[in-house]
Image: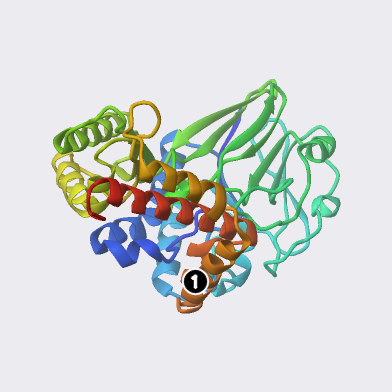
Amino acid sequence: MVYRFVHTADIHLDSPLRTLALRNAELSELIGLATRRSFVRIIDLCLEEQVDALIIAGDLYDGDQTSMKTARFLAEQIGRLNEAGIRAFIIRGNHDALSKITAELVMPDSVKVFGSVAETISIDRAPGGFPVAIHGLSFAKPQAPESLLRHYAVPVPDAVNIGIMHTSLGGAAGHDLYAPCSVADLRQAGFQYWALGHIHKRSAAEDPLSAIVMPGIPQGRDINEDGPKSVSLVTIRDDRSIVVEERRTAVAQFERLAVDISRVTEWRDVVLEAKRSLERLSSAMSAEHLVARIEVSGATELAWRIRRDVDLLRTELETHGAAIGNVWIEKVVTSPVAPTGLDARPGALDELASIIDAEIHGSTEYRDEVRSIADELRGQLPAELRDIFGKDEASFENLLAQCAKDGASQVLARLRGGEGE
């Protein structure tokens, strides 16, 4: 008798929005509800596939939430599982540790929320079914600088052992270090399946009789969580072989769309090229909504005009997205440059560009001045928006370098376009 479950993590119910809310209220509302709608899809999948359990490997919530609307929504969805006889196994991640809802919401008996002491739950199965043991551990505090693996019990003999852990593994960009361990460490523990959470990008290490899966976030919340999002539908067959299927769950999918306008010589062709690229991307989507960041680049004599009229380009693309249906423009980023080299007109501007690259961008005085300006701007922002300048020193420096490069290109493009004459 097979055992089947859906494995998800990092749902971040009702996660507050920041940058989107500043730009487009309608888009903000769509994404603000997307985590809920994605969770409904997960529950629907459990019911449609008639699984035995839903496993949530941490960060069901997004932090210190006290909204009873969130609690009521969760109770309704878990109630749907309970009525169908589907169990739920939940651990608290670093974000859940801050949530009052986690501690106060009363769950039905079909739901097991693991505590801060590791536990092993043996599943009662019908005669003829192989034994299943589920191991889990939550944290009451958001910090977990050391591996949790040593706290888990040894595998239950003759059972299929499933471990649930919230961990950064060996570390990932954009994620704090949390309960670090390696895939090799997890394999040595002897469990047949590790249901992981914390890293928002999907990954899996599988063989026929074991699997270590990080399902990723089921619904992206901003452009840094771009690409398709999913959960895992897991089937453990009678011979104990494991089949992991990726099932898409995102309501709105963020994507970066690169548009190269190097061969374009007319403004209308810039717009047409961007529109065609947007249509191709939209037609390949599985999510209900596409939220696109358009990145226009390339060497063209239109560089100055594209930079100057980016607002007009965005309006054109927003109108076209509305005509396609469910296509949203998150932002239009332009970084075209004026042509240089054999096909460009040699002269003072080319010499100026060379001086900027060779003598200004690399100078300590210039970098210090740019850093000083950025520090002043960052200090004027609300605390929750300061990550716009980077979450660490390395990303801050990279951002400054890119801004300096774009600024120089902007000046040169304007000069070449005649605005500086």
Q: Is residue 85 depicted above or below 175 in this figure? A: above
Residue in the image at 43% along x and 44% along y = 351
**Where residue 115 sits in the image (x, y, percent)?**
71, 63
Total residue callouts:
1
Quadrant of residue 204 in the image? top right
| Mark 1 residue element | helix
Between residue 340 and residue 396, name the one nearer to us.
340
How packed mark 1 is, by other alpha carbons closer than 10 Å (few <14, some 14-19, many 20 or more), is few
Residue 62 visible within the image: no
Relative placement, left or right, of 81 versus 418 is right
Residue drawn at (61%, 48%), measured in percent from left and top? 199
> How does the figure colour the protein chain or chains?
rainbow
Left or right: where does residue 294 sit relative to residue 242? left
The x, y position of residue 249, in whole percent, is: 42, 41
Q: Which residue is at the far front?
A: 347
Residue 45 in view here = yes
Residue denoted by label 1: 373
Q: Residue at x 24, y 51 (%)?
A: 310
Q: Is residue 158 above or below residue 20?
A: above
Quadrant occupied by the N terminus: top right
x, y percent for residue 183? 76, 38
Between residues 78 and 269, which one lies in front from this camera angle? 269
Q: Residue at x 59, y 53 (%)?
A: 362
Q: How far across and down, in percent of the image, does residue 308 sit?
A: 24, 53
Amino acid type of the residue tagged 1 in the rendering: Ile
Please state which of residues 372 and 108 is positioned toward the viewer in this rendering: 372
| Quadrant in which the C terminus appears | bottom left
Comparing 89 with 16, the one in front is 16
